[in-house]
Image (cartoon, rainbow, N blue to C red):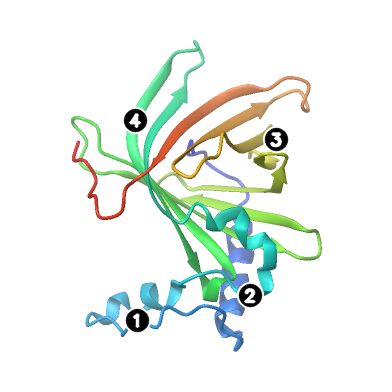
Amino acid sequence: MTPRRAGTRWIAIGWAASALLSLTDQSFGAPTGAPPPADPRQQMVAVLSASGPHASLGDQARVWDRFVGTWDCDFGFYREDGSVRHSPGELEFGWVLDGRAIQDLWITYPREGEKERGIGTSIRFFDDGSRTWHVLFVNPRYGAVLSVQGGVEGDRIVLRGRDPDGGQLRWSFNDIKDDSFTWRGEKSRDEGKTWRVEEEHHMRRRPSGRAKVEQ
C-alpha cells in the first residue's frame, strides 16, 4: 500500500479506543494459550494474538481466515508514466484482540543501498450494525492513516474509502485461491467515473516451514 500523509490522524485515536475496549471485554474468543514470553517487553504482543476468530463473527470469519499465514509478495507500484516499480516482500495475516479482529503486516524488503525495510499494518473488524468490514491502515514512517470499508462482492473482496486529498479509493482482493491472490489498489479523482490502478500486488502463500528468501 502506498504511504500517504494523512490529515485525519484523529481516526487512529478512535481505533485505539476500540482496541482498548476489546481488550477489556471478558468474553474471550480465541486466546493463544501460550506461556508468557521471558522478555516482559514482548508480553503485549503475546496477549494481542489469538489462535482463531471469535465465535461471534460466524460466517464472516471466513472472509479473512483463509488469508491467515505468510505470503511472499511481488509488490507493483504504478508510476504516472505507466511504468511499474517492483519490490519483493511479504504479507502476514493473523487474528488478534481475542479473535474479534484480524491484523496484517505489509513488508517490503530493503532495496540495494537501503538499511530499513518498509512496513505498514492494517486492523480489520466487522461492524454488525452496518454489516461491513472496517479497515484501518497505518504506516508510522510516513504518517499515513487510511480508512476503508466493505466486504465480499461476488468472488472478490472490495473495500472503499477516500484519500486525504479527497480522491476515492478502491482496494480489492482478486483471483483468490488457496495459494495465491492479487491485491489491487485503485484511485478515482472524478467521483468514480474513471479509475486508475496505482498498485497491483501478486501474493503467493509461503509453504509452512520455509523461511523467506533473503534479498
**Could you say whether the residue bearing mark 2 is in a helix, strand or loop?**
helix
The spot of residue 212 in percent (x, y) is: 24, 45
Name the side, left or right, on which 4 lies relative to 158. Answer: left
Residue that numbered label 1 is attached to: 34
Can you name the residue that lies furthest to the right here? 129
Which dot, 3 or 1, sits closer to the camera?
1
The spot of residue 11 in percent (x, y) is: 63, 57
Q: Give the distance between the C-alpha atoms of the residues marked 1 and 2, in whole angstroms.
A: 20 Å
Q: Residue at x 62, y 71 (%)?
A: 18
Q: Residue at x 68, y 22 (%)?
A: 195
Q: Give the distance between the C-alpha atoms of the residues marked 2 and 4, in whole angstroms.
A: 37 Å
Name the side, left or right, on which 110 lies relative to 60. Answer: left
Q: Amino acid at mark 4?
A: Ser
Q: Amino acid at mark 2?
A: Ala
First reached walking from the N terminus: tag 3 or tag 2 = 2
- For the image, the number of numbered tags is 4
Residue that numbered label 2 is attached to: 55
* Location of the C terminus (image quadrant): top left
Q: Give the distance between the C-alpha atoms of the residues marked 3 and 4, in whole angstroms.
A: 27 Å
> Mark 2 near mark 4, Cβ–Cβ under 8 Å?
no
Name the side, left or right, on which 148 lies relative to 69. Answer: right
Which dot, 1 or 4, sits closer to the camera?
1
First reached walking from the N terminus: tag 3 or tag 1 = 1
Q: Give the distance between the C-alpha atoms of the residues marked 1 and 4, in whole angstroms.
A: 35 Å
Residue that numbered label 4 is attached to: 87
Q: Give the distance between the C-alpha atoms of the residues marked 3 and 1, in whole angstroms.
A: 44 Å
Residue that numbered label 3 is attached to: 166
Q: Nearer the viewer, residue 97 or 188?
A: 97
First reached walking from the N terminus: tag 1 or tag 4 = 1
Q: Give the distance between the C-alpha atoms of the residues marked 3 and 2, in whole angstroms.
A: 37 Å
The spot of residue 184 in percent (x, y) is: 56, 32
